[in-house]
Image (cartoon, rainbow, N blue to C red):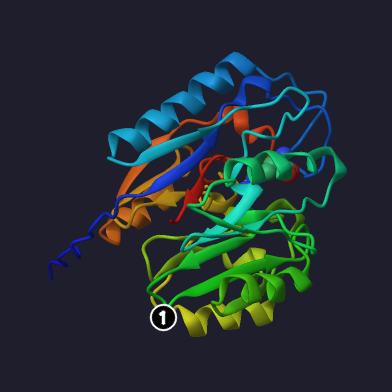
């Protein structure tokens, strides 16, 4: 029997990125970071540039945040805030080494286009929050266990006026939600069950019966750290099996190489915050 792929429709996105000009691994705050391993910053910039060009080539708009010396993780722009329908829930970093990034992001949203809400609770923006506009009328998924703290989930719900479902992360290699789960379109997700507690796996299975399930290899290749426009899925080139699974689901995988930035514990999605005006 021939299975006919579903027709996936892309939706134009506005993204925020920050060049890795000052990228380095100067401290280790996740298991992927090794301060003794050499980092080629020039190569990191080249690979990051390819990622930016890829998004523009797919028809998306990319806004830029100016990188600051002394903030080597600023390239992971996803962590600076979480935006839903023009409201910006600001970040408050767990680790002191990244704390100053929050104010830089806040500065970006200092215009009447945005309503900025300063957080009291520890949270790392889109690193631990995902928004699915077509799931249950608009659903926020929120990770906790390593970085973002549980009270931030309630704070985000009050700030953004959308239901927040708390998902417990249990494997330190998957210390942010966005390395274990991603939205593939406005209503569905792809995830790696092993990153979540048994109870959370049940919750995800209940909410997303049609989810794409990733395996260990996909997850360890940072495959889940992807960005999708509903049709094109930009993901780490090492995640070849996941690319196949996505293709079988009717999506178009767009692989990009980001080996240098993996040394900081991140890939595609970490480098990209979605702006939802
Ligand atoms: N070195 C950074 C950290 O540990 C990596 C952040 C990755 N970002 C992400 N959205 N997962 O905080």
Q: Is mark 1 within 8 Å of ligand 1?
A: no
Decide if residue 69 is on the left or right side of residue 127. right
- Against 230, residue 73 (above or below) is above
Which residue sits at x=72%, y=42%? 103
Which residue sits at x=73%, y=18%? 38
Residue 14's x, y, as percent? 40, 46
Q: Residue furthest right?
A: 96
Q: Quadrant of ligand 1?
A: top right
Q: Residues within 10 Å of mark 1 (few under 14, many from 20)?
A: few
Secondary structure state at the residue bearing disc 1: loop
Which residue sits at x=62%, y=33%? 75
- Against 216, residue 138 (above or below) is below
Decide if residue 110 is on the left or right side of residue 56. right
Decide if residue 211 is on the left or right side of residue 45. left
- Quadrant where the C terminus lies? bottom left
- Against 5, residue 17 (above or below) is above
- Against 53, residue 107 (above or below) is below
Taking depth in this image into account, of 228 and 172 the one nearest to the observer is: 228
Taking depth in this image into account, of 233 and 96 the one nearest to the observer is: 96
Res 40 → quadrant: top right
Q: Is residue 266 visible?
A: no
Residue identifier under label 1: 137
Res 260 → quadrant: top right
Q: Is residue 201 visible?
A: yes
Q: Residue furthest front?
A: 112
Decide if residue 97 is on the left or right side of residue 265. right
Residue 254's x, y, as percent? 34, 41
Taking depth in this image into account, of 74 and 267 the one nearest to the observer is: 74
Which residue sits at x=59%, y=58%? 180
């Amino acid at each position: 029997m021939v299975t006919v792929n579903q027709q996936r429709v892309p939706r134009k996105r506005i993204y925020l990125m920050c060049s890795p000009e000052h990228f380095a691994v100067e401290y280790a705050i996740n298991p992927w970071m090794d301060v003794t391993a050499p980092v080629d910053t020039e190569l990191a910039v080249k690979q990051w540039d390819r990622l930016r060009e890829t998004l523009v080539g797919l028809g998306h708009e990319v806004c830029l945040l100016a990188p600051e010396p002394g903030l080597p993780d600023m390239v992971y722009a996803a962590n600076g805030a979480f935006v839903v329908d023009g409201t910006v829930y600001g970040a408050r970093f767990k680790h002191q080494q990244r704390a100053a990034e929050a104010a830089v992001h806040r500065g970006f949203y200092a215009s009447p286009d945005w309503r900025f809400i300063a957080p009291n609770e520890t949270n790392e923006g889109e690193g631990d929050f995902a928004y699915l506009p077509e799931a249950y009328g608009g659903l926020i998924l929120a990770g906790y266990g390593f970085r973002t703290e549980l009270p931030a989930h309630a704070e985000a719900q009050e700030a953004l006026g959308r239901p927040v479902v708390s998902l417990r992360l249990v494997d330190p290699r998957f210390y942010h939600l966005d390395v274990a789960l991603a939205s593939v379109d406005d209503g569905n997700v792809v995830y790696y069950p092993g990153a979540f507690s048994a109870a959370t796996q049940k919750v995800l299975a209940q909410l997303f019966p049609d989810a794409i399930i990733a395996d260990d290899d996909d997850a360890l290749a940072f495959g889940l750290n992807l960005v999708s426009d509903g049709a094109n899925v930009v993901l780490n080139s090492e995640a070849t099996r996941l690319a196949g699974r996505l293709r079988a689901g009717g999506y178009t995988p767009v692989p990009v190489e980001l080996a240098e930035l993996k040394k900081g514990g991140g890939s595609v999605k970490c480098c990209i915050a979605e702006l939802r005006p």
